[in-house]
Amino acid sequence: MLSESSSFLKGVMLGSIFCALITMLGHVRIGHGSRMHQHEHHHLQAPNKEDILKISEDERMELSKSFRVYCIILVKPKDVSLWAAVRETWTKHCDKAEFFSSENVKVFESINMETDDMWLMMRKAYKYAFDKYRDQYNWFFLARPTTFAIIENLKYFLLKKDPSQPFYLGHTIKSGDLEYVSVEGGIVLSIESMKRLNSLLGIPEKCPEQGGMIWKISEDKQLAVCLKYAGVFAENAEDSEGKDVFNTKSVGLFIKEAMTNHPNLVVEGCCSDMAVTFNGLTPNQMHVMMYGVYRLRAFGHIFHDALVFLPPNGSDND
């Protein structure tokens, strides 16, 4: 009886040691890319309005036409009400927007990824977009159906960024040694980053279809792991005051937090005036945001924006 008990304890100990080793290997695999490149985290800011005013009228018009954003929205059948709201609201302001679904859905037009694994959906959507549109668009914006995006503010933020450089930006989060852009706030890739990502999608050692060896990591973390191998690193997007412009929460939640933490500075303590995204919205909140951002106007007040981004040809946007 004693020998059986001793054997059992030995088995438990050996099993524990084995699990610990596998866990360590899993972490080494995820963080391996960090040894390949030494990169300091960047905070990217929107251009200064005074600098825009120095640009000639002809150059401004050329800039407004040259910025072309392709929008990728990852959806599942259970998101059908959000899907409808996103289609009817902010995606009309993308130069082109397409929905990528986990399965064929008859209600709305979408591209069937034939998987409900979010990382596989993301990989396939990026590959599809690059293969089909690499010569037509220079910026690629990916979002969930709970996200509301102000595409004109995104274009303004990108105004002085060169898409031939490897940009990967949004709302950054640090997880151990890995810094990644949260998909909840939306992810922006330049065409150069898309090229580099596409070159790695067929190399399982650098960009595996499955996440960790034991635990599955989220799709936005997995994307960061792949991009790290390509020398592309997450960068946080901020306005000229250092406020985040890609937000992982809704406006309502930000205001509620500001009222608690900064009761005398609710507006100033809430959000950037040049915010690009908010997340966690219901379909009704999407339409309210659309009203507040694009339709509500103060009579007699004239906006003196130095640059105007024209809607895509044939668009029925607001």
Image: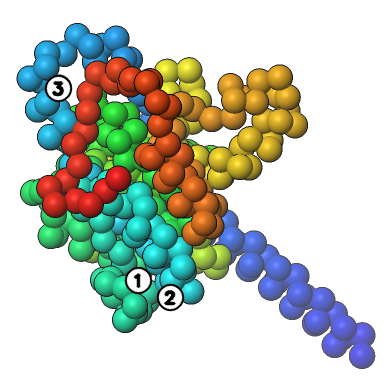
Q: Position of residue 194 (x, y in %)?
A: 22, 48
Q: Are marks 2 and 1 in contact (CB under 8 Å)?
A: yes
Q: Are marks 2 and 3 in contact (CB under 8 Å)?
A: no
**Residue nearest the viewer, comparing 116 with 156:** 156
- Within 10 Å of disc 3 (Cα), the crowding (few <14, some 14-19, many 20+) is some
Indicate which disc, 2 or 1, sits on the residue closer to the N terminus: 2
Q: Is residue 9 above or below residue 246?
A: below
- Counting labels gives 3
Q: Position of residue 59 (x, y in %)?
A: 10, 20
Q: Are marks 3 and 1 in contact (CB under 8 Å)?
A: no
Residue sitting at x 87%, y 83%:
5
* Residue 60 marker: 3
Q: CA distance from mark 3 to mark 1?
A: 37 Å
Check disc 2 and report the residue beneath it. 77
Mark 1: which secondary structure? strand
Check disc 1 and report the residue beneath it. 101
Residue sitting at x 31%, y 52%:
91
At label 3, the amino acid type is Arg
Name the front one of labels 3 and 1.
Answer: 3
At label 2, the amino acid type is Pro
Q: CA distance from mark 2 to mark 1?
A: 7 Å
Mark 2: which secondary structure? helix
Q: CA distance from mark 2 to mark 3?
A: 41 Å
Indicate which disc, 2 or 3, sits on the residue closer to the N terminus: 3
Mark 3: which secondary structure? helix
**Residue nearest the viewer, comparing 165 with 252:** 252
Residue sitting at x 52%, y 56%:
284
- Within 10 Å of disc 2 (Cα), the crowding (few <14, some 14-19, many 20+) is some
**Residue nearest the viewer, comparing 177 with 122:** 122
